[in-house]
Image: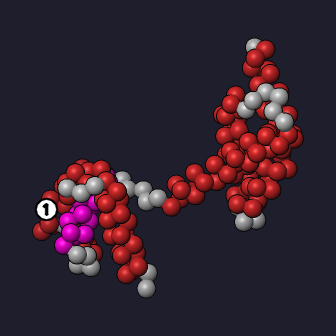
Amino acid sequence: MEDNERHLYDRFDSLITRHGGLIDRLCMRHAFGDVNRCAELRQDCYISLWHYLPGLRIGANAFHETAWVVWHCRSVFSHLRYRRRTHRFLPLDDNMADTLSEPDNSHLHDTLDSLATLLTPHEREAFYLMAEGYSAEDLAIELGIKHRSAVLLRHRIIEKLRHHFTK
């Protein structure tokens, strides 16, 4: 093992030794007391700290080092929260795309039609494009609207359908 690599390992180990309790408290707070979730968050924080450790100034004072650790842990929590909030759209595979093109033989097409009755004509057009696997960028191009408008339209459609079916 090289001397630089050994120095990085020692630096990480001493950082975790000094701030392990703080990281545990931050993770437990964001895990709402769930021990297993806390362990996962702690691991994600350690990975982030290891990844960005070369960016921490050598010889930083205790306050700066603590702020750096808190910043990166909060960044991990923020990224995880954002990924959980976003909708994951997957394009239809070839078999499903074929059934959409044949509405007479497709139960899926009937289901999509019944869902689309709740939407306005503009939303309905976007809904069918979403069902075909169009991304927000593709929706924007196809409908002739801005990217942000396509993202909001997609969100509005999902929320409208979700609200209707969770009553």
Q: Which residue is mark 1?
A: 102
Q: Is residue 112 magenta?
A: no
Can you name the residue that lies furthest to the bottom here?
A: 167
- Is any part of residue 34 visible from this angle? no
Residue at x 82% of width, y 51% of height: 22
Q: Residues in magenta?
A: 121-136
Name the amino acid type tagged 1: Glu
Residue at x 32% of width, y 65% of height: 153
Residue at x 19% of width, y 55% of height: 144
Measured as percent of width and height from the top left, residue 109 is found at: 21, 68
Left or right of residue 91, residue 72 in this image: right
- Is any part of residue 158 visible from this angle? yes
Q: Main secondary structure of the magenta part?
A: helix
Residue at x 79% of width, y 40% of height: 64
The quadrant holding residue 31 is bottom right
In the foreground, 8 or 107: 8
Above or below — where is 128 with respect to 167? above
Measured as percent of width and height from the top left, residue 6 is found at: 79, 20
Query: How many numbered circles are shown?
Result: 1
Measured as percent of width and height from the top left, residue 155 is found at: 38, 65
In the foreground, 3 or 95: 3
